[in-house]
Image (tube, rainbow, N blue to C red):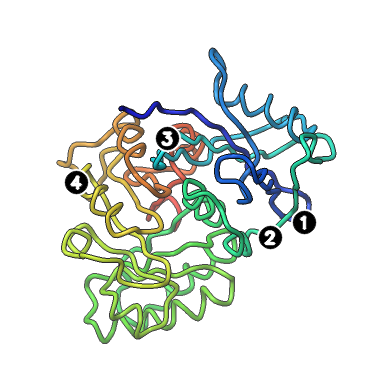
Amino acid sequence: MKKQMLHVVAGVIYNHQNEILLARRPEQSHQGGLWEFPGGKCEAGESALQALTRELEEELGLVVQKARPLISVNHAYPDKKIRLEVWRIEQWQGEPWGREGQTVQWFHSNYLKNNEFPAANLPVITAVQLPSLYLITPEPVSLTDKKFFYRLEACLDKEIRLVQLRAKNLSARDYCYCAEKTLILCDRYGAELLVNASPEIALSVGTHGVHLNSERLLSTQERPLGQRVAASCHNLEEIQQANLIGIDFMVLSPVHTTASHPYTSPLGWFEFLQLTEQAHCPVFALGGMKRTELSKAWAHGAQGIAAIRALWS
């Protein structure tokens, strides 16, 4: 018998200490005893935001004042299929408490994974811990390119907390040297560094993870690292491969025509949204992105935007 799709909404609620509110499911319920982001089922005729606003008031006594989409997850349990739409609650009013007798507690985002969650919530935890901007560096002129490192530090000093080192023109030895210097800067500012190189180089340098290009992705049979793993995707085949090996996040491109690939057909926002719904992890929009398109990216299912020029200059 075909499983019916259940539409569920949830909210990621922050307090002034940047902690996140979790609720514990009643023992007698489905997935009982596990922690979850508060929310509930959509009723007929409700939008996701209307349903979430109602659920958070009924369950916690909170009034949602401002929210934006964070991530949507399709997940199949043995007995049911759910579509989980998660929103980031950016402004709210009230003092949350378990109005239905459930336990509620604030947790720092770094410690969310210490708790047990339903499987559908796991990509949400990753989305919570990722920023909205993913800087892809331009090619350094050399391994001692002073202007490159000066500009990188300026980006880190301002707001960038997730960096991909892209340096295809360097030898493996020079790339490692460049990655080591980049890692020192990223650690200084509390930013994550992923290398667009082999997993062996990532392990050798000790970076926070690896970013697989589409060629490496398609030739990889299992997740290469215990650390952060990201990948570049351009179509459904690559997204399915990324799902298979269980990466943490992906970039999907090109959304728009780009100067570097002028003859590649862009996806456009509608196809981007359709492909994003097939991913089992957060997705960054790449290709002709500008900071001004961040809200549009969120509205079309993206974690945020990835870019070179728009974030570097």
**If you read the primary sequence from the N terminus, does the residue marked by circle 3 or circle 2 appear first?**
3
Residue 91: horizontal and vertical position, in percent? 73, 37
Q: CA distance from mark 4 to mark 2?
A: 36 Å
In this rendering, which labeled residue sits more in front, label 4 or label 1?
4
SS of the residue at dot 1? loop
Residue 233: horizontal and vertical position, in percent? 26, 50
Camera-side residue: 220 or 130?
Answer: 220
Which residue is the site of mark 3? 80
The residue located at (73%, 29%) in the rendering is 65
Q: CA distance from mark 3 to mark 2?
A: 31 Å
Q: Which mark is residue 108?
A: 2
The residue located at (19%, 46%) in the rendering is 237
Question: Which corner quadrant holds the N terminus?
Answer: top left
Please, what is the three-letter code of the amino acid marked with disc 2? Answer: His
> Left of 32 or right of it: where is 225?
left
SS of the residue at dot 2? strand
Farthest-out residue, top: 45
Residue 51: horizontal and vertical position, in percent? 61, 24
Please, what is the three-letter code of the amino acid marked with disc 3? Answer: Lys
Residue 108: horizontal and vertical position, in percent? 68, 60
| In the image, residue 187 above or below residue 289 | below
Which residue is the site of mark 1? 17
Please, what is the three-letter code of the amino acid marked with disc 4? Answer: Glu
> Left of 23 or right of it: where is 129?
left
Camera-side residue: 258 or 105?
Answer: 105
Q: CA distance from mark 4 to mark 1?
A: 41 Å
SS of the residue at dot 4? helix
